[in-house]
Amino acid sequence: MPDHPGAVEPGTGLVRGGDLPHAELAHPDPTRQDPSRDQAWQAEEQAPDRRFLFFSILVLVSGLVAAGLVSWWLPARDTPNVVVVGLLLALGFLVAEQLAINIDVRTGVSWSISFCEIPLVIGLFVAPFEVVLAAHLLAGVGTLLVRKVQDRILYNAGAMIFEITSAFAVATWVKDVLGDLGPAWAGVLAGALVAPLSSTLLALVCVRVLGRTMRLNAAVRLVLRTLVLGLVNASMGVVGYQVVSHAEAGWPLLVLALAGLSALYIAYSGLLREQRDLEALAEVSLIVARSGHQAAAKPSLGRTEPSDLTEIADSDEWQTIADRIKDQLGAGRVVLRLRFEPQLPLHTVVSGDELPPESHDVEATGSRADALLRLPGSHVRHFRRGDATPEIRHALLRRAADEALVVPLRSASHLLGVVEAHDKLSRWRGFGQADVRLIGTMASHLATAMDNRRLLATLRHDAYHDPLTNLLNRPGFRRAAGDPLRRHHDSVVLRVDLDVLSTVSDALGYAWSDRMVVAAGRRLRDALGPEVALARLEGGQFAALLLDTTPEQAHGIAERLRAELAAPYPVDRLTVEANSVVGYSGPRCGEHEGAPLETDVDALLQRADVALRAARSSGDTVKAYLPTMGQIFLRRFQLVTQFRQALETGQVKVHYQPKVALPSRQVLGVEALVRWRHPEFGRLDPDEFVPAVEAAGLVDALTTFVMDQALIRVRKWMDRGLRIAAAVNLSVRSLDDPSFPDRVAEALDRHGVPPELLTLELTESGVMADPQRALPVLRRLHTLGVVLAVDDFGTGYSSLAYLRQLPVDEVKIDKSFVLGMGTDLGDLAVVRSIVELGHSLGLTVVAEGVEDDAARDQLAGMGCDVAQGYLISRPLSESRLEAWLQARTMQARGMRDETVLTLLS
């Protein structure tokens, strides 16, 4: 027959006799309530408890009245050995109660098949009403007391009285109605069916009294299932009694049948337990794995504090695991003590009976470790208070437990946590070997799942964090800033670039520059706070996301960050001051009203980088992104990507500016200057595209192109008997290439031009930046016979010692001094000094920027050797240069019988 509502085991979630939900009849677990809501919970539960108490008293009183009336109505029955029969019936009821079989119907719902109808049938056959009633009450109430369900004793006692009373009343009535027309056992069968039906109907009334609702179709299904199960049990009881009473040697047959049924029951129970154990293991592993995925998938802000780990520990996932272990073991309480990080204390999760406060926060290691937790290994320990050592007994008393299963969760030598199960419920005996095996296997799965969770979290943390600073890296910043940017359009992405790192690493090594990066990251975190997404992108570059921040506020924050980063850094007994540059951009930053918002993290980082580079190039320290900046850098990018095609299609050409000797005005040579007419942008200034080409690593192609065109031009002049040299500008990168002199020699041989007709010009700053590195290439070029010239002399910081050592043949005075020579006595003095210095070193002195006759005459008076500038000619294309030579020069025979061109006045 189905168990009564009060007999439902707390926390099992099983349905006795059908789909009647356990939560509708049992108290909520007090250990799972929010302390801040205790008063509300008590007020909410007080009324149902009072109603149930009145209902229980009503049921008990009604049952006693009904029992009295039935006892008065039933005829007296003379039963020999009535005491022995009563005790045997009580034992039968008790055994039937303990041999209940649980059959899973679906997740969270099962049927509990009880065999109480069998001893009831026997009682209806052989014992008086009062004896059967006493036996049933003795077994049922005793079971409830052992199971600690004292708050339902009144109701269940009344229900038991109604079961026996209705069974005897119906059995006697059916027997009287049928008389000799039907079998003698018909009344007994009918009475055995009425008993579970009456308790089920009473339970439905109890559900209604408690204020719960149950659909009609569910109630009908419950009643039908109760009748089916009652019919099966009652039929078994009737058959057994008839066999024993009327069949020859019936006892052996009944014993054999019971033995077979017992074997089937034991086998089924074992398979059912294994199935539930496997389901519990799979569910626990799945919950831990899902928790690990959620923990790893949670966006981080680049914080180093373990605050997010405690949030994970407080999640409902671990409470669900504790509840599942408790239900599977049938324990009064299960305690999970989990350690999510080695430096964190154990986090305690309790399911079932409330854990005493003094046992809530305990230590597992050290001198103050709890006795139940201070054990090596990973196997299960079974402690009982009766046979335990004093220390273990004291630990059990602190937990208010009589026995406990304790198993540590270990990964290699690391303690991940401890699982404790206290006090077995729903059985007279304590925890058995099956429970030990179950909790051991479950703990092993739980430890493996937790270890995998930690490994997954570690791998994801490493994938999204910078290993040096533990801040976010670029993928981590993209992940952390993506969703906030889509929700907060008034936000700003900052890019911070820290200087002097290369200088520190070159002087002291990368370890010291890394320490500066770590210190800078710590300063930025302290200045921005823990809630701001902060990342180290690479080198000394950082990025931050400022939510709900206007551009004006972002500018102020950027200035504050620069001030924080500007504080001196202690580096190897020195103090280093680092400058920084900040660029920032946002979804609305710099765009016109009505333009679509840009919320892509990479695009905003790129805009902030554009603003940072614009600030660096303009000498600013903080700069906001403007759309025009992006257009400038996009144009530079287009120029770089289209440069090789421009060389091949003839868009890039070489112009030439003549140079004449002073004071003879003989045309000595030309300087080859590159020009680019772009099909989209028109004529481009060399100062715009040459630095971009050089930065992109295409300067070798440019130098080779200009040098080939110049040598072709010189070769044509030589074929006409003219000895006019060509000067080609070199990049510093060419001096870093050891094979460059070989390429120059190959070009001279290919075009048949003597090396003295080729001049290679190098800027003063480029040569002096690293003269030791440039010297080997310069010496090889000098040995080859090529003329070497130092361009823009006077604008750099040349060392005269290095200048004397360099194998150069010419110095070119920068045009800024020549242009101001007529009005500025300082410029005049500089030009005079350079001319005298060059002559003292045996060098030819060339003055560029000569634009008037006065400057030319002054230079000639100083003894300057060569003049170049607009006074003589602008840079000209090949065709216009040939026309200029014909119109502005006259030919004469030179001392070596060569043709000499002299500039006309």
Image (spheres, rainbow, N blue to C red):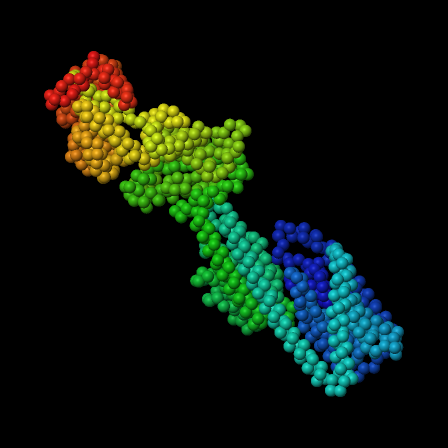
What residue is at 38 percent from the left and 24 percent from the top?
682
Name which quarter of the figure residue 736 lies in.
top left
Relative placement, left or right, of 749 versus 620 is left
What residue is at 23 percent from the left and 36 percent from the top?
743
Question: Which image quarter holds the N terminus?
Answer: bottom right
Name which quarter of the figure residue 683 lies in.
top left
Residue 730 % position (x, y): 25, 31
Q: Height in image: 172 above or below 641? A: below
Q: Nearer the viewer, residue 274 or 864?
A: 864
Residue 480 % position (x, y): 49, 43
Residue 885 % position (x, y): 23, 18
User: What is the tally of numbered marks visible in this picture?
Assistant: 0
Q: Nearer the viewer, residue 727 or 183?
A: 727
- Most extreme residue toward the bottom is 248
The reply to whether residue 366 is in sight is no
Q: Height in image: 26 above or below 617? A: below
What residue is at 46 percent from the left and 37 percent from the top?
603
